[in-house]
Image: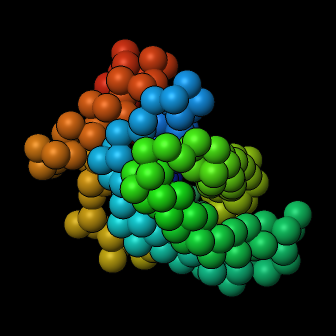
Amino acid sequence: MADLLKQLLADHANFARAIHALAHQAELTRTGQRPDFQVVNGIVAYFRDYAQRVHHPKEDLLYNTLKDRAPTNTRGIYDLLATHAGLPARLEEVEGAAAVLERDSRASGQDFRHKVHDFAAYELAHMKQEEAEFLPYALKWLRPEDWAWVDSPFKDTQDPIFGDQLTAPLQGLLRTILASDPAVRSDHGRGAS
Ligand SMILES: [Fe+2]
Ligand SMILES: [Fe+2]
């Protein structure tokens, strides 16, 4: 239980850092600066490759196991599961708006900023609600073997940006993400492991 819970919370902290860096790139366009499109696309790929393929599937399994253990939908906790399905479309919107901006250097960046803001607000609110409602509920009802069962298929996965085995390009992306967030410079952005 402890390892999986710590990893989910560490993921949330790292997702928030990546979102902060993406928002920083979007804000640059307010003053006529160009975003670093490698950073933007790297962060989009991070959410697609890690959040969607590792973090959310773990949580989906936890939610579904929790339904067996505590079948009442207390405070709409199981409804949170549906919000995972809303992430891909918002990521695509960010990616599409970034591509338009990259092709047209005269574009204002307003659409890109809106799409980033929409994605950021959606994902941050989702994580906050999970931490306030879902994870405490799961801690109350799930058995130790449930947490181990959910974690077992993902034992060999690792975070491609905040993990320990980074390729050189991803080390550069990690540095950029951390550099845009003064709050995390001091701890190098590594969550609990
Ligand atoms: Fe989630
Ligand atoms: Fe989550």
Q: Is residue 170 visible?
A: yes
In x, y percent, where is residue 136? 69, 53
User: Which residue occupies the foreground of this view, 92 or 150?
Assistant: 92
Q: Who's the residue at 53% across and 39% down the image?
A: 26
Q: Who's the residue at 57% across and 43% down the image?
A: 109
Q: Is residue 48 left or right of residue 123?
A: left
In the picture as drawn, the residue positioned furthest to the front comes out as 106
In the picture as drawn, the residue positioned furthest to the left comes out as 168
Q: Is residue 142 left or right of residue 179?
A: right
Q: Is residue 69 left or right of residue 1?
A: right
Number of marks present in the image shown: 0
In x, y percent, where is residue 96? 50, 64
Q: Who's the residue at 27% across and 40% down the image?
A: 173
In x, y percent, where is residue 84? 62, 70
Task: Please identify the quarter of the rendering in which residue 79 is found.
Answer: bottom right
In the picture as drawn, the residue positioned furthest to the bottom comes out as 68
User: Which residue occupies the foreground of this view, 27 or 15?
Assistant: 27
Task: Please identify the quarter of the rendering in which residue 62 is found.
Answer: bottom right
Task: Please identify the quarter of the rendering in which residue 72 is found.
Answer: bottom right
Q: Is residue 51 visible?
A: no
Q: Is residue 14 above or below residue 154?
A: above
